[in-house]
Amino acid sequence: MELSMSGYNLVTTNGITQKEQSDVHLRSVDLNLLTVFDAVMQMQNVTRAAQSLGMSQPAVSNAVARLKIMFDDELFFRYGRGIQPTSRARELFGPVRQALQLVHNELPGASFEPKNSDRLFNLSICSPLDIRLTAQIINTVRQAAPYVQLTIKSYLDDNIEHQLRYQETEFVIGYTEFESANFHRLALFNDELVLAVAKDHPRIENSISSEQLFLESHAVVSLDHRGSFSKPYYQSTESIQAIAYESTDMNSVLSVVSQTYFVAIAPRWLVQACNETLNLKPVPLPWENAKRACNLTWHESTDRDKGHQWMKSLLKQFSLSM
């Protein structure tokens, strides 16, 4: 096919621009299939997706077959009693959800009714805040919106910004401060940090100096674990004599500290909660400001989503209860 340039449009010999060809292709696509894709991705099960859409299972299976042709990918494969998305499906999920939500928000009368909604919300609550907040959030949501579903994970990986941007995760509760202006943040409360030590520690009683602190053997939450409250204090390991134990779970750290002469920086509430079950005591840190803000973070693209607004207002309540 012979091509020529006409202004800024690439024109074919039959006089149709590439943009017009793209528009013709888009008009040939059944955009209703995208709602099926979104439901199947959320449910990871064709039967449950059909129920949520008010469709028959064969109709959803047929739609999935058409989606595979549309995107030239298998999209899903069988896994146990459900299905798992391919890497291509995972790439598509965020943009498709965002596009559908944008359209929904602009429809006349678009609203979110918590009492009747069965919407799925995905939250990330970094450890150890998950211990403190998860059950409270689940119970609060259940009381306000009995059919709303929650999926909560406690580990923040390096892909968390992508997950927030494309609503794979809608909120992050943790100590992380995202640098991009596209992420909005609300400080819920401040955690006071202390030094957790065994009650019978031979060198530490009720206080400790900065010099002594960094001479001790430390147990830490993994230094590359995003959202760790202790990360700023361990940015440079040169001042620490030894990191003797490293874990992604704060409970494991405190358990090891209680049975050794290691030390660990931890929230006061967590050390006190472990007093009865573990051989631990909290010791004040030798710094004036030993607090970390717990932040609620979301991406600006969700600000007009009424369901998102409702969940945000619910999560803000925890700034008043801590």
Image (tube, rainbow, N blue to C red):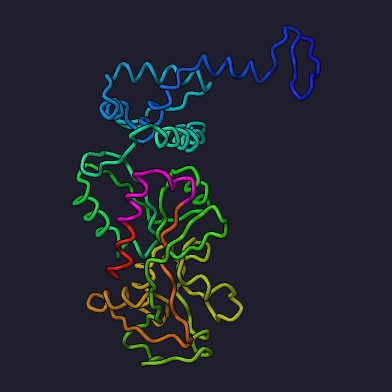
**Residue 268 percent location from the top left of the image:** 34, 78
Task: Work out whether residue 299 or residue 77 is closer to the camera in this orientation and state it.
Answer: 299
Q: Residue 47 falls in which quadrant of the image?
A: top left
- Compared across the picture, whether 90 is left or right of 276 comes to right
Is residue 263 rendered magenta in the image? no
**Residue 147 percent location from the top left of the image:** 22, 42
The residue at the point 43 percent across, 62 percent down is 186
Q: Where 185 falls versus 31 (above or below)? A: below
**Residue 192 percent location from the top left of the image:** 38, 78
Q: Where 9 falls versus 274 (above or below)? A: above
The residue at the point 35 percent across, 54 percent down is 312
The residue at the point 33 percent across, 51 percent down is 311
Task: Work out whether residue 236 or residue 217 is closer to the camera in this orientation and state it.
Answer: 236
Q: Which residues are magenta?
A: 299-314
Task: Work out whether residue 318 or residue 222 is closer to the camera in this orientation and state it.
Answer: 318
Residue 84 appears in the picture as rendered: no
Q: Main secondary structure of the magenta part?
A: helix
The image quadrant where one finds the N terminus is: top right
Residue 151 appears in the picture as rendered: yes
Q: Residue 236 falls in which quadrant of the image?
A: bottom right
Is residue 308 rendered magenta in the image? yes
- Compared across the picture, whether 309 is left or right of 215 comes to left
The residue at the point 49 percent across, 60 percent down is 226
Extreme-top residue of the structure: 14
Q: Where 264 falls versus 203 (above or below)? A: above
The image quadrant where one finds the C terminus is: bottom left
